[in-house]
Amino acid sequence: MANSQLIQTKTFSITNEFVQNLIETHFEDLHIPEHQKGPDYIYPTSEPRTWLPDGKVRMTGSKDSKSVVTFFREIVKNNANKTAMVTKRNGFNVKWSYSQYLTDVNLVAKAFIKLGLSPYNGVCILGFNSPEWLISHLAAIFAGGLPAGVYTTNSPAACFHILQDCNANIVVVEDEHQLGKILKIRDTLPKLKTIIQYSGKPSHPDVISWPDLLKIGQSLPDDVLDKRIKSLAINQCCFLIYTSGTTGNPKGVMVSHDNVLAFAHFTTTKILEFKTNDRMISYLPLSHMAALGIDLYLAVQMAATVYFATPDALKGKMVDILHEVQPTVFLAVPRVIEKLYEKLQDAEVQMKPFKKSVFQWAQQKGINHHLKKSSNNMGYKLAKKLVFNKLKNQMGLQYITYIAAGGAPISSEIKRYFMGLDLIILDVYGLSESTGIHTGNTKNDFQLESVGNVNYIKEYKVDISNPSEDGSGEIILHGRNICMGYLHLKQQTIDIIDDEQWLFTGDLGMIDKYGYLYVTGRAKELIITSGGENIPPILIETIIKKNLPVVSNCMLVGDRKKYLTMLITLKTEVDPNTLLPTDELSQQAIAWCESVGSQIKSVSELIHTKDESVMRAIQDGITKYNHYEAISNAQKIQKWIILPEDFSIGNGDFGPTGKMRRPLITKKYSDLIDKMYAN
């Protein structure tokens, strides 16, 4: 690759007197391990779950069970010179081979030990995706600690909760901005011993730079690390994933070595078609299980190459990165797909009539081909040549045949739209508590509304607990990938994992007669009206967005109320610098307004004028749902209101993974909601 250089082992100069003294100080690891049988040792235990940092759980692992250390070493041994990671530094693409990847992990692991990391204590990582992020994660595991990602959007108070909960001895931050959060809370964290900054030169003398960290690692003999590695067990906690905290304080999901390697093996062999020469882009938060699982564990499993996006990837730069990397694998959360869908629709609105007709003809050929509604492939091949290949080249997706998506529902309308562009969106289903993907659609077996066939993977079971007459109920999961429990939270652990190690997900769904799983909502999100009716909001919200293309987001309201109401936001342009919604309607929204006879161009203008054409058209969409799609009077929407701005992550309406924070939104707009129930 042009403008690239390979990371090599270096002897770093000391930039800090504090670090120099640390290196010269004699070190002895005083930790006395319970055993030295690892790293692939299995503790004998009958416990189905645990909430203790050093707890053990029984496992049904087969002969292929191993630790993350052994897994990583084996991959490196067979792929030493392959490129593992690529990132942009000062305009150059800097590469890590798999051999250098392991070298840096060993150095950082030794440094962590010398800097005071005790076994089963936390190493928190607070920063945007980078090679140093993944190296720190693996190094913490090698050293017997518990790595835990922290979302970059977290406040100092939210950071404090996680660092305190996992007894963090070390925190690795990206830059001065993230460092500032930790400095505000450092004095309240007595177990925090060291702060490391991996980007830029630290301004504080007792904060260690990344080069100095590697130098500290070079000063320690290998046998210190070997002792820690031999004390590992594959049925103990390997790392922590903190939930996004949409319903309360984040909980630390305990993932064992066997959990994550079982996930990596079955996902690459059963769900997603990974190849050894795959290229992928790391841009979603590594604090989330899906991103960490794919960008690290699945990538290493297949010895693929991970390219790290710049922090401005989601600020209008993603297409540039796609063009440069030309990925062969692409993971996206629904919000990313929805924004891409809106941009494509805006472009379609501005097409000239002939070009639009060709585009729409090609879309139909693509849909028919992938849904196998047509045996005549000539039209599809022509559409591919005239439209699909050119469009995918423009988007940097020419080597992509599918996009893996999870974390929240995606409407079938959007999935059908992308299918018409020769891009299949494969819904996958899982939770942090199931170590990511548990089931999913595959390229050769998918249903638009489904999240996969539960009969496809025998080792990973899916069932419905206490199903109602129509077969719906709580989705429960079983398999080697089910987590150990929640750190320090005994009752919550017992509540979600039973004695047979079934995970109670809190998601509602059903399995059809062919074995396809359909997710219908969250049990905690069910609206229970004052009349006792149970209302699943996501289903209704999806229908409204389908009926009204001008709607960006909507939220059903009515818990313990006499009737249902709805908060509605319209599709608007997004500020590329802040990623916050603007007041200006999107091109698609403007076109829709024009189609109903309005010249409205902004949300504020609509709210101020209450434009009759637009308000009537929105009411018509609501009325269509009420008359033809609501299954009972209790599920009809009686009132609605347009909000002054769209929901966004930046404003706190969505969590870091794109899930709607319903309690927060309800509180934020409580005055408007109260007005809808005033009479």
Image (spheres, rainbow, N blue to C red):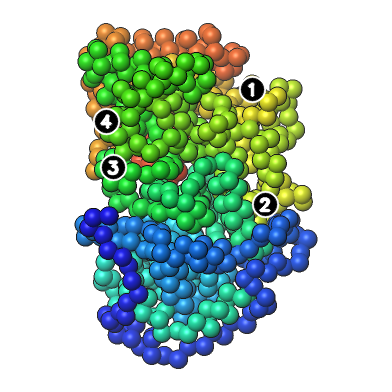
Against 548, residue 156 (above or below) is below
- Spot occupied by residue 52 in the image (x, y as percentages of width and height): 65, 64
Give, as a three-letter code, the residue at label 2.
Answer: Arg
Circle 2: is it few (<14), some (14-19), or many (20+) Cα within 10 Å? Answer: many
Hey, which quadrant is residue 352 in on the image?
A: top left
- Spot occupied by residue 637 in the image (x, y as percentages of width and height): 50, 17
Identity of the residue drawn at 51% across and 42% down: 273
> For residue 533, which numbered disc appears in the image?
1
Q: Tell me the residue that label 3 is attached to.
A: 323
> For residue 480, which numbered disc appears in the image?
2
- Spot occupied by residue 582 in the image (x, y as percentages of width and height): 26, 33
Frontmost of labels 1 and 2 is 2
Against 469, residue 200 (above or below) is below
Frontmost of labels 2 and 3 is 3
Residues at marks 4 and 1, CA–CA distance in whole angstroms: 37 Å
Residues at marks 2 and 3, CA–CA distance in whole angstroms: 38 Å
**Left or right, residue 282 beside residue 468:** left
Residue contact at pointers 2 and 3, CB within 8 angstroms: no
